[in-house]
């Protein structure tokens, strides 16, 4: 017969010697070397549970003890036992009380007359596993809350049916200017420009029809002070406190987009300068070269030579103006250390 390999540490709270012996026999039948600690009263059980050196895997509890029983016993034992699973063993078939005891935190409710080694073993093992799963869920929830609330980027959760904010982190409060209470009284449309709301609804509807759990994009958001910012949004469908919701991470990229537009503007002006250099400068330069050749080869009278000189000077001045304009535009484009800050 296969036995549980773990050496389970169990507290059995039972004042009936016959029932205690039966429980121990069942445990030794299914568990290899179980460590069983006995308590025959609530007082003894309390002492064992308050001893920090004890680390029980589960507690088997008889509901009728000499110094306490029934509901009052559960009210006292559960806070002391938490988070150790408590399995009630009773000789009374009170279904209503059994259901109630499960609702207030009892791991299982077993009748002594129907108890077998297998049913007791399964109850203990399942109760321990449920406790571990519950503990893991709580750890996971804590990690999520830490990630959410300690994130340096604005994050929020909203109800995908009502569009209402369900939770926001401190970064969102600081960046957008609304208090947490204000956020929780708003819908996601109230941080959007009115002309974009219908487009947003259609986009979200399309994403959900495709059954995508995540989405991303760049959108305009409005802060409380009216400032419009560009935001890179990434979102994912989650379940939040039993509600189907969407978790949103919002990264403000306004400064980055402004910088990109500034670079594009500078590039456009550089292209303009390049065109000027390759086209506009060539015309007066070609004329100058032609005039210089004409002067050098001319046999005309001084009057005509003077006219040629005037044309040369005019072309030279025109070229000088163009070069100055190029220098001015190039100077405007050059990034100074102050621009980069």
Image: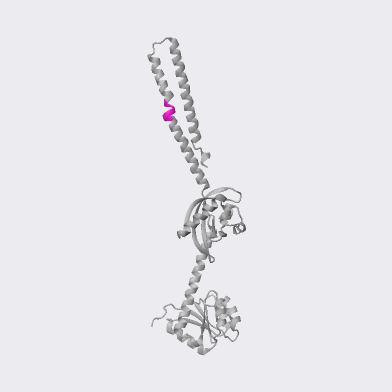
Q: Quadrant of residue 315?
A: top left
On the picture, is 29 further left or further right than 224? left
In-image side of 2 versus 110 (left or right): left
Q: Nearer the viewer, residue 243 or 205?
A: 205
Q: Residue at x 44, y 28 (%)?
A: 280
Residue bounds of the magenta highlight = 277-282
Work out whether residue 315 can be spotted: yes
Residue at the (56%, 48%) spot, across then down: 228
Where's residue 29, x and y in %?
Answer: 43, 84
Residue 187 in magenta? no
Quarter of the view holding residue 30: bottom left
- What count of labels does the image hold? 0
Q: Position of residue 91 (x, y in %)?
A: 54, 87
Residue 258's spot in the image, x, y percent?
Answer: 51, 44
Query: Which of the colour schemes (rainbow, by chain, secondary structure, one colour) is used?
Result: one colour
> Is residue 193 visible from the viewing direction of this image?
no
In-front residue for pair 133/218 = 218
The residue shown at (49%, 82%) is: 36
Q: Residue at x 43, y 30 (%)?
A: 277
In the image, 201 versus 72, the foreground residue is 201
Residue 176, given in percent of the width and then of the height, sits at 58, 52
The residue lying furthest to the bottom in this view is: 18
Image quarter in which the N terminus is found:
bottom left
Q: Residue furthest top?
A: 301
Does the magenta portion include 278? yes
Please, what is the dominant secondary structure of the magenta stretch?
helix
């Amino acid at each position: 017969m296969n036995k549980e390999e773990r050496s389970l540490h169990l507290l059995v709270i039972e004042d009936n010697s016959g029932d205690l012996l039966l429980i121990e026999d069942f445990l030794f039948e299914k568990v290899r070397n179980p460590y069983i600690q006995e308590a025959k009263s609530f007082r003894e059980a309390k002492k064992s549970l308050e001893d920090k050196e004890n680390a029980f895997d589960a507690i088997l509890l008889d509901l009728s003890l000499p110094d306490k029983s029934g509901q009052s016993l559960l009210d006292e034992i559960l806070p002391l036992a938490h988070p150790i699973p408590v399995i009630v063993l009773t000789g009374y078939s009170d279904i209503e009380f059994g259901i109630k005891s499960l609702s207030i935190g009892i791991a299982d409710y077993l009748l002594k007359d129907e108890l077998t080694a297998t049913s007791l073993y399964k109850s203990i093992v399942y109760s321990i596993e449920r406790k571990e799963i519950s503990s893991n869920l709580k750890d996971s929830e804590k990690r999520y809350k830490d990630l959410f609330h300690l994130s340096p980027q604005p994050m929020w959760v909203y109800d995908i049916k009502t569009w209402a904010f369900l939770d926001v982190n401190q970064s969102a409060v600081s960046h957008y200017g609304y208090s947490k209470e204000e956020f929780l009284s708003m819908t996601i449309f109230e941080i959007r420009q009115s002309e974009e709301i219908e487009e947003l609804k259609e986009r979200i509807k399309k994403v959900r029809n495709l059954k995508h759990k995540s989405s991303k994009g760049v959108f305009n958001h409005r802060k409380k002070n009216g400032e419009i910012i560009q935001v890179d949004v990434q979102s994912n469908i989650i379940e939040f406190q039993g509600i189907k919701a969407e978790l949103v991470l919002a990264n403000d990229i306004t400064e980055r987009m402004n910088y990109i537009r500034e670079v594009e503007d500078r590039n456009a002006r550089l292209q303009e300068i390049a065109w000027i250099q390759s086209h506009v400068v060539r015309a007066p330069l070609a004329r100058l070269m032609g005039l210089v050749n004409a002067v050098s080869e001319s046999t005309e009278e001084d009057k005509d030579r003077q006219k040629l000189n005037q044309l040369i000077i005019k072309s030279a001045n025109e070229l000088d103006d163009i070069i100055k304009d190029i220098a001015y535009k190039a100077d405007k484009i050059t990034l100074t250390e102050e621009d980069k800050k």
